Amino acid sequence: MSYAWNWGVLFQSPYLGWLGQGIAMTIVISLAGWAIAITIGTLIGVLHSGGRGAMRMVTGSYINLFRNVPLLLQMFLWFFVVPELLPKTVGTWLKRDLPHPEIVTAIVALGLFTASRVAVQVSAGIAAVPRGQSMAARASGLSTVQAYRHVLLPQAFRIVVPPLTSEFLTIFKNSSIALTIGVYELTAQTQQIQSFTYQGFEAFTAATVVYMAIALVVTTLMTAIERRISVAGSAAKG
Amino acid sequence: MKGRIVALAAICISAALGAASTAAAQSSDAVVDRIKAKKSIAIGYREASIPFSYIDAQGKPTGYSSDLCVKVAQTVKSALGLAELEIKWVPVNLQNRIPLVANGTVDISCESAVNTVGRQAQVDFSSPFFISSTRLLVKSKSGIAELADLNGKSIALPINSVPERLIKSLVERDKLNIRIVPVRDNSEGFLALSTDRVDAFSTDDILLFGLRGKAPSPTDYEVVGKPLSYDSYGFLVQKNSTVFLSLVNATLARLAREGELQKVYQKWFEPLGVPLSVPLATTFQIIGIPE
């Protein structure tokens, strides 16, 4: 093996800057995508758990569609196909006038994909709250909205914090797929460093360490949240 | 006295033989030793680098670069005096071709690698066998002829490529207002152009000609602009394997001298409508050094 190791390349200009920009971009699209995922995912999850008939079919279709189509394909469809299906003026605006179309598309695609997974967990969390709770809430005169707001959701969220931690970790890793529509996130910047310097092993090692670090921070954060919100003696603990 | 002369002669002869054997030692290196020991040469190929190195309908590696390396293998076989030399085809891609050449899995990677100073830190390059230029693919009706005409418009560039780096620096230097849309590969670049997401797609002109040829209606597209770069393609060999590298370059030199290289070029590039350019014809003259 005659590979010439050169760790110094990671600390040289402009490669260090590229790594920094890549990390920032990964964090931005992941957090923005996560905001969409939590909002829409909770909404769909609640509607799915409480809904019947048409409502359950609509939310179920959303979950099945977004959860079962590979994210790589979804990114591609949002970026290249959707603008062609829309009316010409809207399509042109998406392609030409929208600032940073690739970043916006990546955030939307990442958010909607993860939302389907969050929805399943929120819905399962609500189902895991003992049935008596819902009945008692209604019996004490709370409306459906109030029952969800004050009784069911606070308990359900405590139950789903651990699985949501996994989703939160996954969104950072899934964000690397955004490179296929031209977003310069961490993996794309790493590949760029490799293609300019041919020091691929060093660059990919750096990316591995960064992804690990992000994962550790997220895990620590979520564990802290879990501990902080846990109710003594409740089933949601642990 | 006579005995002394004989002894002296013996010393001279053995010294000469010694020198000869030292010379023999210098006519070998790690790659040559490996080829001799295994009686096979590992040639790297790409799956879809048309027309340089790709898989044909029968699933066999073929193309301009592959053809040339088969001739390299013949040279190596006769130079090493081997009765048999098996060719082992090893698939490579953009990410692994350098490590595979560096670690000796591949003896020579025959595809479409641009020679750059940065890459020479890891591998050595053969003499150039192709020159490509960065140019623009546009829609025929757009009226765009040069990079400057794209001011206020947008261009797609393959992510992490040499053309991307070049166009970005030109845009910066000339203070042009061009929106850059990075795309993952050439087919995505073409898609962005055909769906009017961008006004031009730029990469190596030979690849642009290939994309234009595959378009549903090729006349709707045009390859325009003056060449923005001269990128020379070379075969990749392990660093510091000078004996093997000279065999490779000697093969290219002989082919260029005898006009064989030009014929192989025509075989692969005439069907694409890309005649031998003046810079490439000159390059063939330069690499065709005498025996």
Image (cartoon, grey):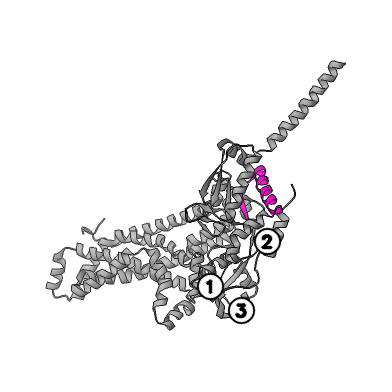
- Residue at the disc numbered 3: B149
Q: Earlier in the sequence, mark 2 or mark 1?
A: 1
State whether residue A162 appears in this view. Answer: yes
Q: Same subunit under labels 2 and 1?
A: yes
Q: Residue A224, position in %: x, y? A: 34, 59
| Element on which disc 3 rests | helix
The residue under the point 63% across, 42% down is B76
- Residue at the disc numbered 2: B280
Q: Earlier in the sequence, mark 2 or mark 3?
A: 3
Depth check, mark 2 against mark 3: the one in front is: 2
Chain letter of the residue carrying label 2 = B
| Element on which disc 2 rests | helix
Q: Residue A107, position in %: x, y? A: 41, 70
Q: Which residues are magenta?
A: B230-257
- Residue at the disc numbered 1: B218
Residue type of the residue flagged with mark 2: Leu
Q: Same subunit under labels 3 and 1?
A: yes
Chain letter of the residue carrying label 3 = B
Give the image quarter of residue A64: bottom left
Q: Is residue A232 magenta?
A: no
Q: Residue furthest left?
A: A139
Depth check, mark 2 against mark 1: the one in front is: 1
Residue type of the residue flagged with mark 1: Pro
Determine whether, in the image, residue B262 is placed left or right of residue A214.
right
State whether residue A32 appears in this view. Answer: no
Depth check, mark 3 against mark 1: the one in front is: 1
The residue under the point 67% across, 42% down is B243
Q: Residue B261, position in %: x, y? A: 66, 55
Q: Report the quarter where the C terminus of chain A lies.
A: bottom left
Q: Residue B75, position in %: x, y? A: 64, 44
Q: Is residue B24 above or below residue B129?
A: above
Disc 2 vs disc 3: Cβ atoms closer than 8 Å?
no
